[in-house]
Amino acid sequence: MNKTIIGSETVTVHKKRRDLTRWYFIMPCLLFMLYFAIVPTIYVIQMSFMKYQVLMPDIPPRFAGLRNFIRVMSSPEFYNSLRVSFWLSITGPIVQAIAGLGLAILLNTIARGRRIIMTIMLIPMLVAPAIGAFIFKTLYDYQWGPLNYILRIIGIGRIRWVSDPDLALFSLWLFHFWVATPFMMVLMAAGLSSLPQEIYESAALQSRSGWQTFIHITLPLMKPYIILALILKFIDSFQGFADAYIITKGGPGTSTESVPFLTFRMTLVGFDVTSASALSIIQLIIILAVVFTFIRTIGIKTGQQKANV
Amino acid sequence: MIRRKSSIVVSYILLGIVLIVFLFPLYWALNTALKPYRDFFLDPPLFWPVTFTLKNFIDGYVLGGGKAVVDSTIVAVGTTLLSLILGVTAAYSIARWKTGGSAMPYYILSMKMMPPVVIAVAYYIVLKRSFLVYPPFDTHILLILLYSLINTPFVVWIMKDFIAEIPVSMEEAALLAGVSRLRIFVDIILPLARPGLIATAIISFMYSWHEFIFTIFFTSMKVRTIPKLVPYLVTEKEPLWGAINAVGFYGIIPMLIIGFVLQKHLIKGLSYGALKG
């Protein structure tokens, strides 16, 4: 069964006698996950099929069939939150990845000061999203914010960053961009430094231009890293909460209400825990579906990569 | 040769602009934190603190900034310890014996995809109904638990590769000498896995230091981490711009110091998951 890791036969014999050791080591983690994550999650699944009022705890939950799911999926708020979450978590990571890759390549062209620039670019990542969001809220301030002052100087005039329903989502997007682009840059720089140098040397011998090298060598080799970065940031941005909570409060209206924010509002403002449970299950399914489709794609891509090299 | 030089100059100029753009928000926060109250509402705004004051930092402390640093530290240290203890032992088991088959790492990693808000709703109902034994609302231990739930899968995922790279020959020798597995784990594996441990510890600490959604659901008066305190101060009648920004720096400065001192490990931790995944 366990052929690979432990090579010597003496140890294999040893191991058979104390076969339980491996379980001693993994049990704390599995039990912890089971009791504190799986049990409540099963409870949420159960709750999503129930009729229950959290404000009237004396009335026991009763079976309600699919009514909660139907209520959630027939509300315009649900589709609005899907639009917000998908817009932030698809357009955001794509642009951030392009910017991150561009910055990593730019960083590779210079010899001195690479390290110090990397250090400085780490800073947005070290700021808590809640604090960063608050800082952006002050930047976006209509009356006293510096962004509107700069826009006024260059002749565009003041913009309602947060209170204009058409702009508010972009303002959140911009905040995501600030937070995530440095992370993308770090990932891409790590990816670039792991690429085999010989390929570039031979490309230089064939006197290919920088752009050709990028399109034909760098981009295909970087593909697995890029897709992985997109997945990681998709999960992150889809679950974004601090930004909407602090910068826009989901508003104006519901124009920036992401799926997690809607779930939060159902639970802590509407006290409708059964609908919130149904919505939780729906978003869990959405995220798993998207991620597994992505992972399938990477599996194929990395396989091809290895075949090529 | 000349063309190459000029393109390098262009690179530096572009990078310089990027740095300015990405640092501006933080500069503005510092600028606000160092200004006296009357200077916030000026048109045009002051782009540097003309009258320099530290009053906002004192106000921030009085408004709960000091306690928030303590709360954040307790929760972050607790989370780091708990998720490393649970995660590294599990990673050892997976790396050495492939416990649970090749699918086990993926089961554990799929926990990472669980949206925190789903866990939050689950805990909200479970705690309200209080029919199972779970830590109560508004306690450090509840936050430590929830954060560890989210963070442990990451620790397992990174550490299993780190441990798999450690040669088994030393362990075999120790086993033949009759040393127990636990001793081997503590005395041989942990020291050799040190770079990985530091990298995962710093990411765990940072995750906990930054976490927001659970604090909104599960804390109110007793436990108030820095990310929780910031929006709490905003909802007051008159936003205390200076004090809030100062409190923000209570949260930013410790993380900046940790990030810069352990920069190599931080970058490794950030990129390792992606590169090995």
Image (spheres, rainbow, N blue to C red):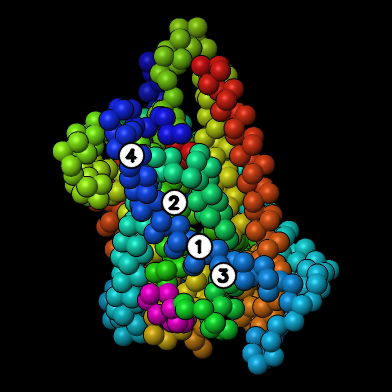
Q: Is residue A254 magenta?
A: no
Name the element at disc 4.
Answer: helix
Residue where numbered disc 2 is placed: B154
* Residue at 25%, 46% in the rendered image: B181
Left or right: A211 in relation to B241? right
Name the element at disc 1.
Answer: helix
Label 2 marks which chain's residue? B
Label 4 marks which chain's residue? A
Q: Distance from label 3 to label 2 (Cα)?
A: 20 Å
In the rendered structure, which segment of residues is drawn in magenta? B135-142
Going from the N terminus, do you reach mark 1 or mark 4 first? Answer: 4
Q: Looking at the picture, does residue A249 appear above or below residue B264?
A: below
Q: Distance from label 2 to label 1 (Cα)?
A: 16 Å
Q: Marks 2 and 4: CB-CB under 8 Å? A: no
* Residue at 56%, 28% in the rendered image: A302
Q: Distance from label 3 to label 1 (Cα)?
A: 9 Å
On the question of residue A233 being in view, the answer is: yes
Tag on residue A34?
Answer: 1
Q: Marks 1 and 4: CB-CB under 8 Å? A: no
Residue where numbered disc 4 is placed: A15
Q: Badge 4: how crowded within 10 Å, few (<14), some, or many (20+)? A: some
Q: Distance from label 1 to label 4 (Cα)?
A: 27 Å
Tag on residue A40?
Answer: 3
Name the element at disc 2.
Answer: helix
Comparing marks 2 and 4, which lies closer to the viewer?
A: 4
